[in-house]
Amino acid sequence: MLAETLMRQLFFGESHGVGIIRTFQGHCARFLTDTALEEALQAQIADESRHARVYARLLVKRGGVRVGPAAADPGWRTIVGHMAAAKSFSTTLIGIYGLMEPFNLLSLENLLRPLLDASELAEVDQIVRDEAGHVGMFDVFAELVERRILRVDGAECTEMVRVFATWHDPDSRSPSPSPSPAASPSPSPSTIWQ
Ligand SMILES: [Fe+2]
Ligand SMILES: [Fe+2]
């Protein structure tokens, strides 16, 4: 795969991810009093914005390659669109922190890095360090779920995984996706956002 192809996917995910994480932060703010977590989300938003700018700049440097939404893989657009439309804690938790961040990290390290020159590596290595930190936020949110401060919707998480798996393996596309029913604990409305 060409470096430009990978960068186009990454640019698309980063630029739209910023909006998804902003929505996530806005909803969580009603329930969280954890300043450190709030600051981590703010830092992540700033990181992802900077990442999008880096990819746009690298793409332009490599010959003015298009960086608009149409340049991204349709499957990738489906995943990002699914998360943006759901605007929920469950989908964002699984989508961003459980799937996209780890997947991006693996792609960056194993696919993109070997294709870059020294000047590009310096910029992308900073992104790799940032993404490694973002992956760790999954554990923070998982703990809040364990403490029942936040609730995950089982069916919604299953659907997010199905959308992601379909992108990677077109053969797995089933004619009638039927996520399993939610198996969530009873919510306490004053402390739970899903
Ligand atoms: Fe990023
Ligand atoms: Fe990230």
Image: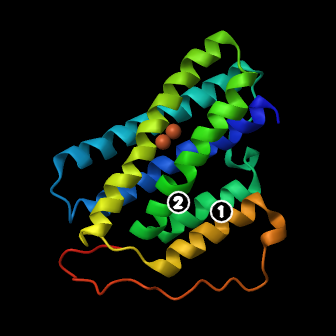
Left or right: where does residue 166 sit relative to residue 87?
Answer: right
Judged left or right of residue 84, residue 136 is left
Q: Position of residue 23 (x, y in %)?
A: 38, 59
Q: Position of residue 50 (x, y in %)?
A: 47, 31
Q: Secondary structure at mark 1?
A: helix
Q: Looking at this view, name the residue that lies furthest to the top.
A: 118
Q: Which quarter of the picture shows residue 191?
A: bottom left
Instruction: State the image coordinates of residue 48 (x, y, percent, origin top left).
Output: 47, 38
Mark 2 neighbour density, 10 Å: few (under 14) some (14–19) many (20 or more): many
**Horizontal relation, residue 92 to residue 35: left or right:** right
Q: Amino acid at mark 1?
A: Phe
Q: Which quadrant of the figure contains the C terminus?
A: bottom left
> Is label 1 in contact with label 2 (beta carbons under 8 Å)?
yes
Q: Tell me how the rendering is colored.
A: rainbow
**Distance from Cα at disc 1 to Cα at disc 2:** 8 Å
Q: Is residue 88 visible?
A: no
> Height in image: 168 above or below 13?
below
Q: Earlier in the sequence, mark 1 or mark 2?
A: 2
Residue behind mark 1: 164
Residue drawn where x is 53% and y is 47% of the image = 101
Residue at point 41%, 38% (across, down)? 133
Query: What's the residue type where badge 2 is placed?
Result: Gly
Any part of residue 106 in sight: yes
Image quarter in which the N terminus is found: top right
Residue 103 lies, with reference to residue 99, above or below; the image says above
The quadrant holding residue 4 is top right
Measuring 62% from the left and 45% from the top, which residue is drawn there?
12
Which residue is under mark 2? Answer: 95
- Between 178 and 26, the residue placed more toward the observer is 178
